[in-house]
Amino acid sequence: MSFPFNLREKISEIEASAYQHYRLRFNPFPMSGVAPEHPRIFASRSKTYERISDFIVRTYKSKKWAGLAIIAEYGNGKTHTLKLIRDQINEELGTTPEGKCSAFYIENLGESLRDLYLEFLGEVGFSLFVELLWNVLCRRFAKKLNDEYLSKLRPQQVALVTPPKNLAPFFISLSLFKTALDKSYLSREKTSVEIRNFLKEVVSNDNLLKCCVILVTETDDERNDLAWKYISGRSLTITQYKKIGLDKGSISDEDIGLELFSDILKIFTENSYTNIYLCLDEVEDIIPIPKQRKRELLGGLRRIIDNNQSNLAMIIATTMAGYVDLRASSPPLADRFPVLVELSPLNPSETRELILQYLSMARVTPEEENIYPFTEKLLEEIWKRTGGNVRKVLEACYRLLQAGVSQKAKVLDLSLLET
């Protein structure tokens, strides 16, 4: 029986030599024109990017709250720009002599504060969160690690296995620490109480505190999974939340606005993070949300901002219609984003620069810098037909290159736009 698609054969056929005639290794243009997860190419908008850079530098230096709104119509690079901002902050400012920075991309505000919180914790991730918790504890344990203190943490009953005399090495890493608890070198009950007291200096929400203690003391996978599920904003059944000692099964918007978001930021600042940047995309999606629910969402976001005036900055991206709706629905929230940056459609020279950058990414000879197999006349036609819309430009370039390969055209021309 033969299969109808022969996908591997066709893919290898295309990859092998199809683009060599154009001095390219592959088609560098995205088929859908959508931004990749980690973009390396950007449209030549020097003044716009300069304003964004100034905002980042200013907030990095001040450590104070600030908000910026990127306004653009669909296809003009909002998502691409936000992801580029996130990556540049993480690469260039991730670790500096002054401290650490981290930027997180949030795809959508959702319809409730809990949706936003869930997206944020999903970006933070389980591994990083546990690492941050452990670092908080390490600094506090380090101030007390002497024989007298460690003896207080030992079990009262005689252990089945004789514990080492020196328990300090078990505090070097979380895995060794949990080993000491599992082998009863340390009393789980006494140590958990001590950890709870340490974390209370940072975490104010009681349910979050209970879950954090579980993450750094338990080796039971199910209990760890349930604790993280609750921390990251997902719902637990009655049986599940009772199993880990919580008094309710899900985080509320009120919890997030008043305590939880601030608690998470405190955990970051305890780890020498001086700046957290949230890059919020598709804010225009709030337009159809019912008024009452929208008011609650935007009011909750404003509370988060007002409760975290240090170490936090936000960059939102929206269409002009979305920004107008935001200002009409919550003028106080809109006022917290006073810096407006517009991503206008590209002009002809910017369109040319964008195409050149993508071509350079796939050149057989990296030093080559020209628009071949495109022509200046073709670039002009692409700009006219797309109106300088970034997504449409990239889609047109992809189709042209594919059509050229398919028809074995020596050079790309206007006729290929019609195929």
Image (cartoon, rainbow, N blue to C red):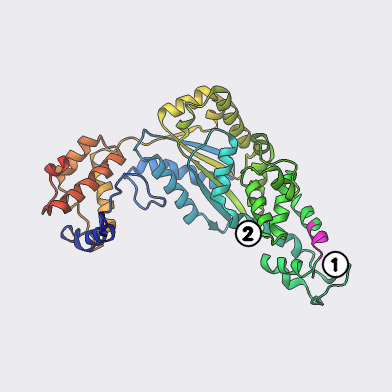
Tell me where residue 172 sits by quadrant.
bottom right
Q: Quadrant of residue 361?
A: bottom left
Q: Which mark is residue 155?
A: 1
Q: Secondary structure at mark 1?
A: loop
Number of labels in the image equals: 2
Q: Are marks 1 and 2 in contact (CB under 8 Å)?
A: no
Secondary structure predominantly adopted by residues drawn in magenta: helix
Q: Which residues are magenta?
A: 187-192
Q: How far across and how far down the image is residue 152, in percent?
A: 86, 65
- In three-dimensional space, the C-alpha distance between marks 1 and 2, rounded to whole angstroms, equals 26 Å
Q: Is residue 190 magenta?
A: yes
Looking at the image, residue 362 sits to the left or right of residue 234; the answer is left
Instruction: Pinpoint residue 412: horizontal percent, then vertical percent.
Output: 14, 49
Residue shown at 53% from the left, 45% from the top: 277
Amino acid residing under circle 1: Pro
Q: Which quadrant holds the C terminus? A: top left
Q: Residue at x 16, y 51 (%)?
A: 404
Measured as percent of width and height from the top left, residue 45 is found at: 34, 42
Question: Could you tell me if residue 204 is visible in this image?
Answer: no
Q: In the image, 194: left or right of 284?
A: right
Q: Nearer the viewer, residue 266 or 98?
A: 266
Judging by the rendered image, the residue that carries numbered circle 2 is: 131
Q: Nearer the viewer, mark 1 or mark 2?
A: 1
Point out the tag, 1 or 2, that comes first from the N-terminus: 2
Residue 146 image position (x, y, % from top left): 81, 70
Helix, strand or loop for disc 2:
helix
Residue shown at 19%/43% (left/top)? Answer: 379
